[in-house]
Image (cartoon, rainbow, N blue to C red):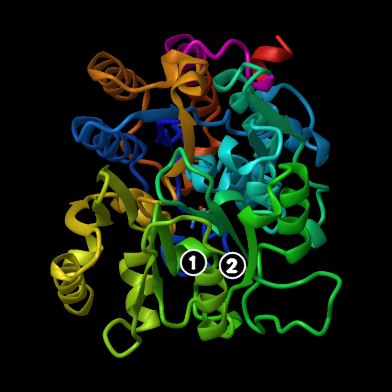
Amino acid sequence: MHALEVNFDGLVGPTHNYAGLSYGNVASLNNAASFSNPQEAVLQGLAKMKAMHDKGLTQGVFAPHARPDLNVLRRLGFTGNDAQVINKAFKADPILLRACYSASAMWTANAATVSPSPDTNDGKVHFTAANLNNKFHRSLEPNTTTRLLKAMFNNEQYFAHHSHLPEQGFFGDEGAANHTRLCDSHGETGLELFVFGASAFNSQLVKPVKFPARQTLEASEAICRLHNIKDTSQILLQQNPDVIDQGVFHNDVIAVGNANVLLCHQQAFLNQTQALDDIREAYVGNKQLYIIEVPTSKVSIQDAVSSYLFNSQLVSLSDDKMLLVAPQECQRNPAVKAYIEEMIIADNPINQVQFFDLRQSMQNGGGPACLRLRVALNSQELAAVNPEVILDEQKYTQLCDWATRHYRDKLGANDFADPALLTESYQALDELTQLLSLGSVYPFQLEA
Ligand SMILES: N=C(N)NCCC[C@H](NC(=O)CCC(=O)O)C(=O)O
């Protein structure tokens, strides 16, 4: 059946800031002291969404989360009314407050893992929100993510929603950032690649030594079971622990797949030659599978991490033509730029590149692919999606206007002491839920 891949991009939230919260993510640590510009950030993301829409692709919008997370601050012992809670938290532990203010839900590649219907035994599209257990600020996301997913994909006939995995490091799950799917076309049965960083229970498997492995084998296995994925549509691979230690904190920082193309660095996987042979053997399509392996001699790991080449999106513009949606940092890096030029004229389906200014997100380690959750949908499934979360010209204009009215253009350390930031943010989100017909999804709406 004909199907499309719909990218649901995270709208950057009104409290986007740089707090240096993600140990192992080089950009997050390097920019910890910088001022952020939430308004510029949300408009940069919207410009990418609009460009995808203008290319004729179906583009979705994923709402941000309500921040600060007051419930967790109260759970941690801060008392009083909202302003008092903020005031006390700011004085006692400003970084904790910043974590509760983080807009990290913008990186929807980490929102959930999605298995499209051709790959599952019951023919439904399966969703599991990621528990994001490895980082405190991200562990605050799964409940709201699940409510948002249910408000967007609200039809039991087509969509199955699962609870996030147990909230413990053994089941650390970072969602689609460690999951990609290879197939002849989006409507056909594919091969889902689950890439884990370490095993929780099997101490025989190697691990990174410096930075954490955020996705465990056990989490990936649980998702395969929950999603009832056909045996022939799943393969588990281990990420190369050496590159995790060099700042490759998710697989989507070192590899990206789309349809019958896998673009990956030479050092992406553990025992790479074997891993790629296993993928070729397991591939269920009939078309030629293109594995484009980028050699270290052309693009070093350091260049891959600083340019985010592999965090580009690869999107199909027609049956055999693909566009690389790259961050502008790739254009500025001579080795990466040269490699892209070589790749788009070589014999493979990638034949165009477009660069985007996503600097606000990039400074926290989030490139084009981090900002989107891919959902392959056939026409009936697409018709069952909440239509208000699909971008068109009018929605784009409304969202730009909404962001310009509500978002600040500068946030630095001291701004988090100001309770007006909470009021402004909640007002913005309340209006957004109407704009996107989401109903009540935020704690401040549910508890009101
Ligand atoms: N690769 C993918 N798919 N996603 C990128 C996520 C970036 C995010 N950064 C942050 O959460 C930084 C927040 C801060 O430091 O303020 C993270 O590390 O989880």
State the image quarter where residue 226 is shown. Answer: top right
Report the residue at 36% width, 63% height from top.
288
- Per the image, label 2 sits on a secondary structure element best described as loop
Compared with 433, 312 (above or below) is: below
330 left or right of 12? Answer: left
Report the residue at 69% width, 21% height from top.
443
- Per the image, label 1 sits on a secondary structure element best described as helix
Q: Residues within 10 Å of mark 2 (few under 14, many from 20)?
A: some
Placement of the N terminus among the 4 image quadrants? top left
In front: 2, or 19?
A: 2
Q: Would you say residue 312 is visible in this rendering? A: yes
350 left or right of 35? Answer: left
In front: 182, or 354?
A: 182
Compared with 290, 388 (above or below) is: above
Task: Check if residue 130 falls in the magenta segment.
Answer: no
* Percent position of residue 160, x then y: 69, 29
Q: Which amino acid lies under the numbered mark 1 shown in the image of this protein?
A: Leu
State the image quarter where residue 3 is shown. Answer: top left
What's drawn in magenta, residue-wise?
429-443
Q: Which amino acid lies under the numbered mark 2 shown in the image of this protein?
A: Tyr
Which residue corresponds to mark 1?
29
* Percent position of residue 87, x then y: 64, 35
Q: CA distance from mark 1 to mark 2?
A: 7 Å
Which residue corresponds to mark 2?
23
* Percent position of residue 394, x then y: 25, 13
In front: 48, or 238?
A: 238
Q: Residue furthest right?
A: 201
Q: Are marks 1 and 2 in contact (CB under 8 Å)?
A: yes
Q: Residues within 10 Å of mark 1 (few under 14, many from 20)?
A: some
Q: Would you say residue 363 is visible in this rendering? A: no
The answer as to whether callout 1 falls within 8 Å of ligand 1 is yes
